[in-house]
Amino acid sequence: MAEFVVGGAQMGPNQKADSRKMIVARMLALMEEAAGRGVELVVYPELALTTFFPRWYMENEAEVDAFFETEMPGPETAPLFERARELRMAISFGYAEKTPEGRHFNTSILTDRAGNIVGKYRKIHLPGHSEYDTERAFQHLEKRYFEPGDLGFPVWRNEGVIMGMAICNDRRWPETYRCLGLQGVELVMLGYNTPSVNSQMSAEGLKERLFHSELSMQAGAYQNSTYVVGIAKAGVEDGHPLMGGSIIVDPDGFVVARAESEEDELIVASCDFAKCAFGKSTIFDFARHRRIEHYQRITEQAGVIVEV
Ligand code: CDT
């Protein structure tokens, strides 16, 4: 079991007009700061390289594709990998992926400390809608621009730690953590872009949204005895506020590092992965305590069926 210094590189807003070069320069500055603080693995947000473009309704394919990467690393992202390799820092970040077959995914990758990509995850729980919605205060068109991920919830043994990834809305679903937990996950990395207000319910504001985000990640960590690193892209992006609230949660569900701003901000925690073993071998010893003969509904039924 390894002890590891983990960094969360919360990012402030990326404006539509910002070039990849400008954004990567900010990511590199966060990486340098992380190196200065002894970080061995740094986690960046969902769709780290662009603005959160699903807020915009677009019909032109070329306009949409401008937000997608066709190679990773590509010319604009290569400096991230090169510097990480020099610093011997593993990295994880999210981006919009267009495959050679023309498929579109909301993706995260994970590297080892030598800069090799060792893991890829494609977002499974895509929120929002696929057509323009006149009832919403602003759009959330992830279902328009992305397919649901096709890779499941894999884990990788990376630098001696069992690691898994999730992306934004995935963090609200217990199924996400449990699929990873059943593979012994010790570190769940996830990035997010969460609007500070609910486009369908004006009464739900920043306070409630931060609470739901923390509640979900702390529960996922505790119930699976794993560290969870949840990292925001925050601040006012193209006139639309995104919440911050990046946290690192330990396997007992306690927050051990927390961002205070809505800007580029590094949070750091020294993670002792031996701490995952206690919960996994006692109250959440799945092999001894799970009662799978009563869980069929979870995979056989998506929506609620009321029969009484
Ligand atoms: N990016 C992302 O998944 N955001 C969602 C917003 C939910 S409202 C449609 C989230 O769960 O934070």
Image (spheres, grey):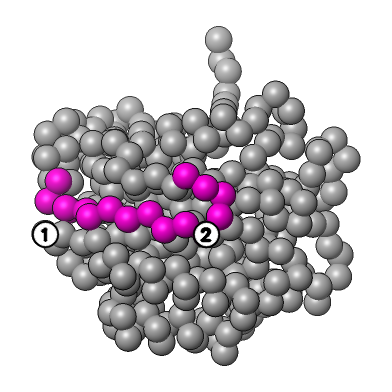
Q: Is residue 166 magenta?
A: no
Residue 35 figure quarter: bottom left
Residue 1 marker? 1
Q: Residue at x 81, y 73 (%)?
A: 63
Cβ at disc 2 under 8 Å from ligand 1 = no
Q: Circle 1: is it few (<14), some (14-19), or many (20+) Cα within 10 Å?
A: some
Residue 206 in the image, given as x and y percentages of width and height: 61, 34
Residue 165 in the image, given as x and y percentages of width and height: 40, 58
Distance from Cα at disc 1 to Cα at disc 2: 31 Å
Taking 130 as reference, is 303 above or below it? above
Comparing 90 with 280, the one in front is 90
Q: Circle 2: is it few (<14), some (14-19), or many (20+) Cα within 10 Å?
A: many
Q: Helix, strand, or loop for circle 2?
A: loop
Q: Residue at x 70, y 72 (%)?
A: 18
Q: Residue furthest bottom?
A: 75
76 relative to 266 in the view: left or right:
right
98 relative to 81 in the view: left or right:
right
Which quadrant, please, contains the N terminus? bottom left
Query: Which amino acid type is shown beneath numbered disc 1?
Result: Met
Q: Residue at x 33, y 39 (%)?
A: 255
Q: Helix, strand, or loop for circle 1?
A: loop
Comparing 128 with 196, the one in front is 196
Residue 266 in the image, given as x and y percentages of width and height: 42, 58
Q: Magenta stretch? A: 260-275
Specify whether residue 103 is in view. Answer: no
270 relative to 21 in the view: left or right:
left
Residue 65 marker? none
Residue 264 marker? 2
Q: Earlier in the sequence, mark 1 or mark 2?
A: 1
Q: Residue at x 69, y 51 (%)?
A: 236
